[in-house]
Structures are given as structure tokens and as C-alpha cells.
Amino acid sequence: MSKADILIIGAGATGLMAAHVLSSAGKKVAVLEARNRCGGRIHTLHNQLFSKNAELGAEFIHGDLPVTLNLLKEADIEYQSAVEQMMRYRDGKFTEDSGFEDWDKVVDKLARLKKDISIQDFLDREFPTGEFDELRASVIGFVSGYDTADPARASSFALRDEWQGEDFEAQHRVKGGYGKMIKHLEDMSRRAGAKIYLNAVVKEVSWQPGNVRVATDDGALYEASQLLAAMPLGVLQANKNERGAVTFSPAIPGYSSALKQMGFGSILKILLEFSAPFWEDGETAKRVGANLKDMGFILSGEIIPTWWTQSPQQSPVLTGWLGGLPAAKQKDTPPEEILQLCLQSIANIFKLSRDELKNKLIAFEVANWTADPFTRGSYAYDTVDAAGARKILSEPVDNTIFFAGEYLYEGPAMGTVEAALTSGLNTAKKIISLA
Ligand SMILES: Cc1cc2nc3c(=O)[nH]c(=O)nc-3n(C[C@H](O)[C@H](O)[C@H](O)COP(=O)(O)OP(=O)(O)OC[C@H]3O[C@@H](n4cnc5c(N)ncnc54)[C@H](O)[C@@H]3O)c2cc1C
């Protein structure tokens, strides 16, 4: 290929947003993507296996988030409310979940914390075992389930900010799936002249100020004046012989230790489609002693603890979620075994036998993002050292190499599509302004 102005590694939300902005500004852009599709952690299945669009990765817009909503407006893509009834299943009973009782105590102690420590250390100090077992389990469940983080590394300050900032009342889904937004970015970039190469697994970046040469695993070479590295943190943290890992030659001083200081979680997301939404029917209500017609989320103590429906939209799909260290432990478990764990968890919750459930099942998909070589986890969380590391990683290297991704975003929407889009946008603007 002829020399590009800018090579972008990764066609996720970050890389494509940057490609869109840079190519619109007249830059000659080439995007190298390891998979045979764009989108990365956004992966909408369009009526392939499931009767409706199904999200294997990102699904919600967590709030009225400006960059995401602007982009949807630009692309003329609609979104709809996803505020859902939250239920808790415990000791054989369903109750509406109104958060855990001692939440205020935790928030109050967090507000008085002077020096950042991990949330595990915070709990050990302020809420010791024995007296506070239930409170500790609730906090750790939330940090694992929602932030998909390791409590021994997750920053108390960051969690405090997140818990104060999130607007749980403004949750949306993209009509037709997040994949539509990716398609828009892809189309706009291509229309402005960007080239997108799929199945291009980058292995090595050789660079000097003003010039980069990138080699892929099939021996192809690409050249440009600048590089924007938009692969996930999990890939950047991988050992050099692992699939997907990228070596920089010469190494960038300070980068490797900064990358290790950042946190990247683990996740398993599972989609199950049944012949009908059995949780809505009268028989289920009688059997479990609760009307679950409007059920959104269910939080439980089962092996796969969190489940949700597509409410308020009608759908026979249940989505399962296992985050944090419990998901990391299942990294090498085959999908069939994960399915059995799912069926057992749902059977326990809805008081059905596993065989009864299996007979109702018409499709399933296990998205084991932690085992995926081009993701290697879920999304970033802040460790106690993350702020310093992020500063180092956000600095352009000799105006030649730029890093971008959801893990470099600073603001209230950490780890989200908004974070990725914002990072891609801001980095593209930085490249343009430094030219
Ligand atoms: C299961 C799950 C559910 C989520 N749910 C939500 C949600 O509901 N709402 C929300 O806002 N966010 C959610 N997120 C987070 C959100 O998906 C991500 O923050 C965002 O999509 C990240 O975009 P990105 O471009 O930074 O990274 P990615 O989307 O991971 O893109 C990086 C790209 O780099 C490519 N790549 C990797 N290695 C190489 C290589 N060596 N050579 C070439 N290319 C390479 C990858 O294939 C990938 O396409 C979820 C994430 C997961 C995993």
C-alpha cells in the first residue's frame, strides 16, 4: 500500500471515531483490524442466531452521554429507554431491589477517606468481617458485577466518584443495536477515503520520529507518518508471545510499567433465547410467588448471578452476566459447560428443572471476552495507581505514536462506549492540532 498519514490499529469505537474525524479533516488514514469485522467490543448479531438483534458486547447507553448521543443524532439513529425493574432473588423469594441497606454507611465512610486505597483494604479497615459480612458481600458483588474489577486493586476514590455520578434513571438502548453506530462510523470513514483492512493482526511496530512501519502476522507491511494505537488495554498488557500482542521497537520508555498499573476486568456475557418469555406467564407467577411480567434485572446468589430481559421491549431473550474474578476463573471453561451453569442458575431462580428449561431453549451464545485474544478482558477500571499511569499513556510519543481507548478516558462514564468515542475524538483532534 502507499504510505498513509496515519495508521490506526483497531476498528472499535475508539479507532473508528478517530478514523472518521481524521479522514474528514483530509488525512490519509488506514485502519488495521485483527478480526473479520469492525466494532470490537460492540458486536450486534443481526437476526443471525436470535430472532431480534442481540448484543454480545456493549448494550446500554449509561446516561445522557454527550458524545454518544451526538453521534447517534448525526447518524439519524434512534435510541429507546432501557430503565428496568430491578429484582432480587434471595432465599427462594423475589423482592424489588432498592439497593442494599447499608449503602449510606459505605458512601459516608468513603466520603471521609483522605488517601486512596483499594476497596478491599477500605472494607477491611472500615467494615471488618464478622460484623459486616453482608455489607462486604454486597460491595464486592457490585465491584465484581458492575465494574468487573478485582476488589484488591480497584480504587476507592474512583468507585466513590462513579457511585456519585451515575444516573441510573437515564439508561438507553440503541434501536437496532450499537452495530448501527459502528456501521455509520465505518461508512463515513470510507467515504472520506479511509482504508479499513480486516484480518490484519498487527504484531510489530517499528518506529522513529515521523515514521512508523507496522507488520501483521501474515507478513504484510504498512507505513505511515503517525500511529494511533486503539487496541484494548488487555491486548496492550499481554505478554509478547501471546496472540494479538504488539511489540514496539524501540520500546517506549515508561509505557510497559504504566500499562501494568492500569486495571482491566473480566467478563462473561451469555444470551439465551427461549421459545417464549416464560417468566412473564401466570404459571411462573404461581410457581415462584411473584409477578415477573415487568421484570428487568434479576440479581441473585447463583453461579451466574445477574440476568436481565429486554424490558420494556418484548423479547424471549435472557442475558446472563458474570463479572470480575469469578469470570476470570471461567476463562477456559468451554461454552457448553457455561451453558449448563446458566441453565442451573435460571432453573434455581424460576423453580424449573434443567431439562424443562433446555426444552424451551432455542438459541444460545456465550461471549467469553476474557478468552478472546483481541480483547483479553472486559473494560478498564481505576486502580490506586491509574491516574499517574493514564497521564503517561496519554502523552503523544514524539508526535508519532498516540494511544487511545476507553481506558484513557477521564470522566464519569469509565469503561463505556462513551469513553471509547470520547478518547478517539479527543486524540484525533490532538493529532490535527499538533500537525
Ligand atoms: C460484555 C461487554 C459488555 C459491555 N457493555 C457495555 C454497555 O452496556 N455500555 C457501554 O457503554 N459499554 C459497554 N461495554 C464497554 C464497551 O464495549 C467498550 O468500552 C468499548 O466498546 C471499547 O471500544 P474500544 O474501541 O476502545 O475497544 P474495542 O472495541 O475492544 O476495539 C479494539 C479493536 O482492536 C482490535 N485489535 C486488538 N488487537 C489487535 C491487533 N493486534 N491488531 C489489529 N487489531 C487489533 C480488536 O479486534 C478490536 O476491534 C461492554 C463491554 C463488554 C466486553
Image: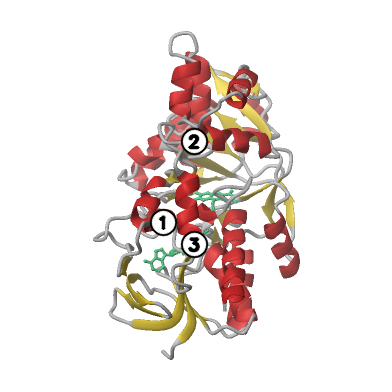
Q: Which residue is mark 3?
A: 395
Q: Quadrant of the N terminus?
A: bottom left
* Ligand 1 under 8 Å from disc 1 Cβ: yes
Residue 51: give x, y in percent of width and height. 59, 56
Of callouts 3 and 1, which one flags the residue occurring earlier in the amino acid sequence? 1
Q: Disc 2 marks which amino acid?
A: Ser
Q: Quadrant of residue 435?
A: bottom right
Task: Give me the C-alpha separation between circle 3 and circle 1.
Answer: 23 Å
View extreme (bottom): residue: 2
Mark closer to the chain start, 1 or 2: 2
Tag 1: Cα neighbours inside 10 Å, few (<14), some, or many (≥20)? many
**Which residue carries the number 2 mark?**
155
Seen in the picture, residue 6 relative to 270 is either above or below; the reply is below
Give the spatial CA distance, label 2 vs label 3: 23 Å
Comes first in the chain, label 2 or label 3:
2
Badge 2: few (under 14), some or many (20 or more) residues near its Cα, within 10 Å?
Answer: many
Image point (46%, 57%), residue name: 393
